[in-house]
Structures are given as C-alpha cells and as structure tokens.
Amino acid sequence: MRKALSQEDIRKYNFTLWKLLIGGIILFSLFIICIGFGLFGELPSFRDIEHPKSNQASEIVTDDGRVLGTYFVQNRSNVTYPEISENVINALIATEDIRFREHSGIDFKRTFTIFFYALIGKKQGGSTITQQLALNLFSEEGRQKNFAKRILQKFQEWVIAVKLERNYTKEEIIVMYLNTVEFGNQAYGIKSAARVYFNTTPDKLTVSQAATLVGILKGITRYSPTRNPERSLARRNTIMGLMLKENLLTQQQFDAEQQKPLGLHFSAATVNDGIAPYFRAVLKNDIRRIFEERSITKPDGTPYDLDRDGLKIITTLNYDMQVAAEDAQKEYMKTLQQSFINSWKGRNPFKGKEAQIEQGVKRSDRYRALQLEGKSEAEIKEDFNTPTRLTIFTWKGNIDTLMKPIDSVKYYKMLLRNAMMAMDPQTGYVKAWVGGINYEHFKYDQVKMGTRQVGSTAKPFTYAVAIENGYSPCFSVLNELGYNRSSGKSTMDPAFRRYRSGLPDFAKRTCTFAKLYCCLPDETSRPYCRGYTG
C-alpha cells in the first residue's frame, strides 16, 4: 500500500508548483521584455510605428482629377476608412478576428483555444488582425518557415501589436491592414483588388464581392477567383456563413447572395494598365530628370522613388480627349490595316526585301537575348526558323500561336503604325498623346522619338491663314509662283526663290503656299516659312 501524503508533503508540493509557475511567469515576462528591447532581433522604433512604410504606387492624374495610370513595384494605392464598404469590414472581422474591437492587440482567449483545436486535429490561426498587420508592415522576410524562428517571430508580433494598438485607433488599424495585404494578380491593398477583380472602388463592393476578396487572404493561389473559381466560390459562401453567424448578415441576404456567381470583371494589373502608356513612359523619365536637376528629395535627403513613394503627379492631359484619341486610332487603324493586307493579296511584299528582314531580326529582343547567351549567328538563324509558342499583337487582342520567329518579324513589318499628339495652342499644354498602336508590343514612341516630316499636317495652318485673310477655300493658285491678289504680280522675291530651290517638291509647294497666304496685299505681315528669314 502507498503511504498517504502528509499535510507537510502536500504543502511542499504546492509550494514547488507555485515556485515553478511564478518562476515561469517571471522568465516569460523577462523574455517578452528582452524582445521589446530588441535583444532577439531588431524591432521597429517609435518613429517606424508612427510612420510605417509600404510600397505605394504613384498615381498620374489628368487635368480633371481622374487617374490615367500608375507607377508601381507593388500595385498599391491607399484608401481611408470612409472609402471602404462596411461589407468588407464585416467580412474581414467575421473571418479573421471576431473580437477585434474588444482586445488590445492579443486575443488570449483565441490564443489558448488554438492549442485545444490542434490536439483534436483542427488547425486554426491564432493571429489577430493587429498581429497580421505587424507581420505585414515590419517583417521583410514574411512568415518564418522554421518552427523555432516562427515562435520567436510570433512573440515579436505580440509586442508590435500592442504598440500598434497604443498608437492607432481600431479604424486606423483595419484600414492599414486592408491597405497592405496582397490579393494576388499584382493587387496590393483593397483599392487595387476592387479594381483588378471587379472594376469598382472599395466603397461600392457588395457583400458577395467583399467576401470573395477576403476569402483570397487565406491563400492567394488556392482561393484565387481566376485560378480556382470553384474553391473561391465555396470560400466566399463560407465567409458569408460566418457573417450570418455573427449577425452581420440576415438570413434573407445570405440566401440571396450565395446564389450569385462570382461575377468577376477581371483586369490584371500591369504597368501598362490605364490610358496614355506612351505619355506615362516619357513623363516618368522627365520627372526623374527634373528631380535630379532641381535636387528635389524627401525630407531625409533620400531621392524619391516613383515606384514606391506614392506620389500624385498632376498632368495637363485631358482624360476624355485621350480616350477619344485612342478609340479613334483603334477604330480606323483596324480598317486601314485590313485594306493594306488586302492590297497585297497574291503578291509577296518581301520580295527583294531580305536586307530589311535581316535588319528587323537584329533589332528584335529575341536576337539580343540569344546573343547574350553566346549563340553563334548560325544558331540564332536556326532558332528564328524553328516554330515556337509566341504571343503576337492583333487588333482583336493578343493571340498565343505557334510561329517561326522569322515569320513574326515579317508579320510585324506588315503592321501599319501611327501616332498623334494634341496640344493647346494658347498654353502649349499637351492634351492627348498616342505614341504608337500598342505600348506592350511596340515601345518606340513615334511622338517623342519619331523624326519624320510633318507633311500635310502643315496644311490646316497654312490654309487657315489664307481664309483668315479673305481667300476662298475654292481659290486656286499656280504651283510655281507666289501670287499677290492686289497687284496680280509674283511675290516670290529672289531670296525666297533661292531658299525654295533647294527644297524637295513637297516642301516647295508648302513654302509657296505659305509665302502666298501669309503675305497681306499691303505687305504689313511678314512671310512665314520654317527656315526662311528673307
């Protein structure tokens, strides 16, 4: 038989247990204090907490305040609390942290219950929204894979979460969280996600749309509505069920919303998104040059980064004029392109053009890449004559096809290209800029870099001066000599004649008309022609 424990033994055991418990609490407290002082790894300073950094896209804005595009490393634009739909807030809280408004950064009840769930095989996350924000803002490496490092990281999140709760309101914390999380497909933050997946703004997201976006946070690939739409739909309905459970959604709303399809209006985010891509490329280089020439820097003396610092760049471009210009180009170039192709039916447009094709090959990105790989000319030629998967531009959209690279060079040689620029003549402000037919495939900006003659573009200016001075649109003149309507004599003085004689035919005609139309009968207005000062 076992000997019964005496009262003295019981007191000793109780005393030992209390010592272990109190000692453990003291050691744990010291451990947390050491973490707070950064002994187990650097923590963000008070200044960092007050001014958290995140890569934020810079927005290019038109003259009427509309965004025409962005510069970014991460496609992120921040929003404020009133700009976010209540549906998003409710979906997030119901899913990620139901006691968000009650705790001070750490939900101890949830923390302890996850151990119980782990024992019965139901894995659950124990991080509050504030802890997840701490990880997003201040951990460059992201969530640690190593178990020991992850435990230490978890305690660091606790310390940072408490600091965040002391410095920010609950509304500010949830906004910072929604502005920092990744939603996949180059969408960072709720504003970009709303635009990429549903072509809307955060304040207009419906219950089902909000639940879909919040569902992505559990796994941006696994629950992606573009890659795994069935899983995304099931996850969306699960989240709406959690909202129903927490009385954030009525049964009637739930029944109606769960029957809806995903209803995506997907538009993948790239640096080419938006209107006026050629203009934005030129603008970016100009801004960098201006910053450098004028020594414009951030308050700490470091240079601005257009891709990360969230600047707002206000331009003279007019949104409606730019859209009209791009639409007009697409409408008429489609027709002109088809007419051009039809005109070559039954004929070989490249007969005797071997030199031009070879030039096109050597100017291609593929040729340069193969050269950098150390390929010989023979190997490069073989590569260009081997069918491969290519994405080519058409006026109906990009097409993935099997094609020899040499044939793609010929294909692009047959594409007509054009450009246009509209400017306010009173101020010199650029109102529309279309540098080419497609920036993704053709980076050459014909507005900025093209050096071709103006051709018939000069005619409206020349004719306008004539009409302004009383000439009828039906009035005709000889091509060879200028004419003064009052005297009936030639106005082509010797200096002008000498200048004109050295010009090509098209320029001779332009300058003849310019001399005629800009010369008033009383000779009070000086003739104008580029390069002529007689």
Image: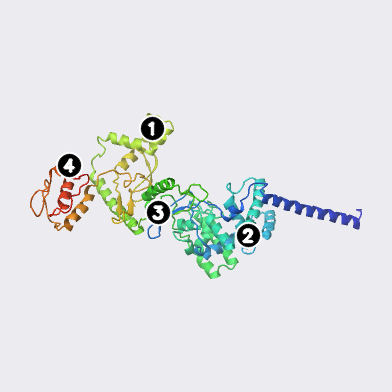
Q: Gap in Å between the C-alphas at discs 3 and 1?
A: 36 Å
Asked if the residues shown at circle 1 and circle 2 are in contact, with their CB atoms under 8 angstroms apart, the answer is no
Q: Nearer the viewer, residue 405 or 313?
A: 313
**Image position of 216 (left or right of 284):** right
Residue 231 x %, y %: 53, 55
Q: Residue at x 19, y 55 (%)?
A: 465
Q: Earlier in the sequence, mark 3 or mark 1?
A: 3
Residue 146 x %, y %: 64, 45
Q: Residue furthest left?
A: 488
Which element is circle 2 on?
Answer: helix
Q: Gap in Å between the C-alphas at discs 4 and 3?
A: 47 Å
Q: Residue at x 8, y 50 (%)?
A: 489
Q: Nearer the viewer, residue 166 or 527?
A: 527
Q: Which residue is mark 3?
A: 274
Q: Amino acid at mark 3?
A: Gly
Residue 380, numbered circle: 1
Q: Amino acid at mark 2?
A: Arg
Which element is circle 1 on?
Answer: helix
Q: Earlier in the sequence, mark 1 or mark 4?
A: 1
Q: Amino acid at mark 1?
A: Ile
Q: Nearer the viewer, mark 1 or mark 2?
A: 2
- Crowd rating for badge 1 (residues with CA inside 10 Å; few <14, some 14–19, many 20+): some
Q: Nearer the viewer, residue 452 or 19?
A: 452
Q: Amino acid at mark 4?
A: Tyr
Q: Nearer the viewer, mark 3 or mark 1?
A: 3
Does residue 238 show up?
no
Give the total number of marks visible in the rendering: 4
Residue 520 x %, y %: 14, 54
Q: Which residue is mark 2?
A: 166
